[in-house]
Amino acid sequence: MSLEKPMLDDAERAVLGRYFTNLDQPVFALRNLPEVVKGALFSRYSRTEKSLRQVLLDEFIQAPETGFAELVGAAPAAEDNLLATRRAEEFYDRVLVGYGDDSVAELAGAHLAVERVSTLAAKALQDSRIGISPLEKSTRYVRFDRPDAAGRWPYHRGPELAHPVYERALDALFGTYSDLLEPLTERVRQRHPLEPGESERAWKTATRAKALDLLRGLLPAATLTNLGLYGNGRAFEYLVTKMAAHELPECRHLADDMHEQLTQVIPSFVRRALDDRYGRPAAERMTRTAMAVRELAPAAAVSPDGPCVHLVDYDWNAERKVVAAALFPHSNLPLADLGAADVDRVLAALLSERGNRRHKAPRALEHAEYTFEVVANFACYRDLQRHRMLTQDRQVLGSELGYDLPPDLAGYGFDGPFEAALEHAGAAHRMLERARGPVLAQYAVPLAYRVRWYAKVSLREIYHLCELRTTPQGHPDYRFIAQEMFKRVREVHPRLADYARFVDLGPGDELERRNSERRLDEKARLA
């Protein structure tokens, strides 16, 4: 027998109308509720026959012990909201205690802003693949040479980095970046003047983006940036614990700061992140493990290498695995019996009607996997690391693999000061490496220097990454890497690669953002 009331009366509808997008339809969204209430509400929802609306009414709104009224703002403005929050949290903890599954912590989330952190720390924050959605300040649209209130360039400073060469080297990088930006932008605009029918907004944005793209390699890994993070409680809990174990002091400080702020909005879901029973011991174990493995890792002199992509491993039987996985949900046979089907016919049925890159490749393609080793500049890694549906890890950023000079810089006459700044920074990095060790010395390395990383990627992600990252408006550096990854896949599995028809292997546009900005103008005109 259902516990659902036949209908809500007028008074109940008046109360509930604030918290749901509708009160009559079977599909509805929640609104105006704190995250912890949503989490507790959904937890309770899984173990009752009531509608979610009725659960909120009966067990939260009409239960004074929950502190619900105070928490959602119905209390007098003068009341201490922190006290109300603590009272409500005590109740919600009692609700949640009966749900031992960690997945309960995925039912509430938070938006977190993290400002004025180094690019190096930003990469650590973005290294979480599941449950966290990051958005970072763009080097393509934002200039990074605005000094702070004290007139200092915006890069990370910490007692662990105190060394005469550090600030001199980074000041020189920022000084070169700032000195070149305006004259380079002017020369870009001279080469690419405003065209008939093009708005001044689109032209200025595209040309400024070109200049910023060409100069971003001067920015050191210490450059301060801003991030927005949205994530569920479970993901934030692990991220805080992982940051507490990080080898950079900046990241360990961030763990404490993040935990303090998250405790104010989703405390029930991040309580274990740094506690003495779970969080701290987990962080200490991560630290010990990293140190033990590092001692076993061999090292040797490395010759500078240009940007490159090597396919180091792939599945020779990938075609049959993809075919079997595609047929499986439509058959009554075991998976092992389905690989003998006609590969061409199955792939055509599965993929031939893709009309654009937003027609996602099906799940069956996840059964083909590839492992790449990539060498590219750190700015390129910074772009590609944001792809989360893969397994990747990088080596320590240094100067031994050399750096990339943007080819267009010579045409604009600015390659000389650009290269001189990189050489000076490379020498400073090597001095800092001897004095402070390779981990801390990363802060001094400009984004133009190369780093080596690996990526284990399914064919489904290859479709997504390569079709997205080879579009003409993309940065030339990551376009090259994405194109090379696709070429390596096509060499070993041409039939599987054939349907990734929106990979652009062309040379790209010299002024990458021009057409995109024009399309934005057209959309605004039609809106």
Image (tube, helix red, strand yellow):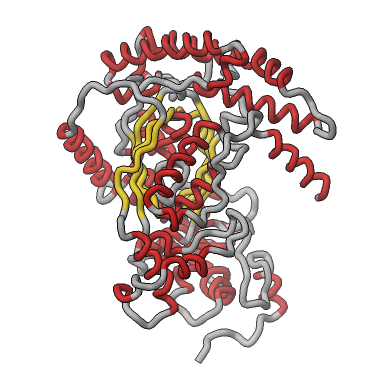
| Position of residue 139 measured from the top left corner of the image (x, y, whole percent) | 56, 29
- Whether 448 is drawn above or below 7: the answer is above
In this rendered view, identify the residue nearer to me: 269 or 433.
433
In this rendered view, identify the residue nearer to me: 437 or 527.
527
Count the labels in the image: 0
The outermost residue toward the bottom is 1
- Apparent side of residue 479 relative to residue 439 in the rendered image (left or right): right
Residue 497 showing in the rendered view? yes
Q: Tell me which residue sits at (49%, 68%) in the image.
A: 42
- Whether 506 is drawn above or below 315: the answer is above
| Position of residue 46 measured from the top left corner of the image (x, y, whole percent) | 45, 74
- Whether 356 is drawn above or below 183: the answer is below
**Snapshot quadrant of residue 102:** bottom left
| Position of residue 516 measured from the top left corner of the image (x, y, whole percent) | 69, 39
**Snapshot quadrant of residue 377:** top left
Residue 237 showing in the rendered view? no
Q: Tell me which residue sits at (63%, 87%) in the image.
A: 6
In this rendered view, identify the residue nearer to me: 42 or 204.
204
| Position of residue 375 measured from the top left corner of the image (x, y, whole percent) | 38, 32
Q: Tell me which residue sits at (46%, 24%) in the image.
A: 447
